[in-house]
Amino acid sequence: MTQTRTPMVAGNWKMHKTVAEAQILAREICRGLPVPLTVDVVVAPPYTALTAVAREIQGSPLALAAQDVFWESQGAFTGAISPMMLTDAGCRLVIIGHSERRQYFGETDDSVNKKIKAALQAGLTPIVCIGETLAQREAQETLTIIASQLNNGLLGLGPAEVGRLVMAYEPVWAIGTGRTATPAQAQEVHHFIRHWLRDQVGSTVAEGLRILYGGSVTPENIRDLMDAPDIDGALVGGASLQAASFLKIVALGA
Ligand code: 13P
């Protein structure tokens, strides 16, 4: 992590927590945030808990994110949620292109691209997820895959738009497996992403943009990951479901 970028720790609650459970977790996180807070802290509950969590965190530095969004603003799209519905529910950010969306729900770089543009239009900060599968890593295709996800996912975005993104590198083989990327493995890809961004939109934007790491982040490994120069925070799954472990990651991620 380089000092010029404010670290970010985001908890992706995935398909966990009822409304009541989400309220309790959000309350516990708010109460336990370090003072002063030198990290941007974000929680991404399921859609059903967004408004309740928004109320719970009102007046706190905790920011609310959704886990996905659709690109259309309204219409006959059964089951979909628009960017404006998310801002209306109190969201400031939205996770886009998570590998679980790609794997189970047919998300593609093209849909990611549309969602990013729609989210930006609505004033949301997209947290854009990219990452390779184990088979792709073993075939030495990691950087090719990352480049293609960047080329297609960020297609048509200018420097000002890219500057409003948060990127998240989440190797699929590290998600929920307990098999964290080593700081060196993550740093290699984070550096590659920043270099790609520098080529596309210039060094000012590239140096200012945060690149989070996600995949089995815990209080035990966050410090070493954050020591890598291009890792600017974490997107946390399992360890974000309990206030104690999430707050430890927040404290150590500063
Ligand atoms: P885990 O921290 O459970 O591996 O999940 C990471 C993730 O997918 C966050 O978006």
Image (cartoon, helix red, strand yellow):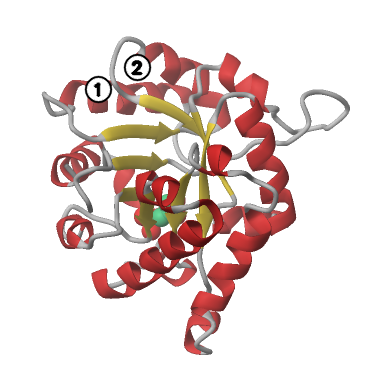
Q: Is residue 105 above or below residue 96?
A: below
Residue at x 56%, y 17% (from the top left corner): 89
Q: Residue furthest right?
A: 76
User: Where ligand 1 lies, by quadrant?
Assistant: bottom left
Q: Is residue 246 left or right of residue 36?
A: right
Say above or below: 148 vs 64: below
Mark 1, residue position: 30
In the image, 198 versus 192, the foreground residue is 198
According to the picture, the residue beneath numbered tag 2 turns out to be 57
Q: Amino acid at mark 1?
A: Cys
> Decide: marks 2, 1 in contact (CB < 8 A)?
yes
Is 139 positioned to the left or the right of 179 in the image? Answer: right
Image-quadrant location for residue 171: bottom left
The residue sitting at 86% across, 24% down in the picture is 75
* Element type at mark 1: helix
Please state the total of marks drawn on the protein image. Answer: 2
Q: Is residue 9 left or right of residue 142?
A: left
Mark toward the start of the polypeptide (2 vs 1): 1
Q: Position of residue 114 (x, y in %)?
A: 72, 43
Q: Position of residue 251 (x, y in %)?
A: 14, 40
Q: Residue at x 51, y 61 (%)?
A: 199
* Residue drawn where x is 53% and y is 89% of the image: 139
- SS under mark 2: helix
In the displayed orientation, state which residue is furthest to the bottom.
139
- The amino acid marked with disc number 2 is Ile
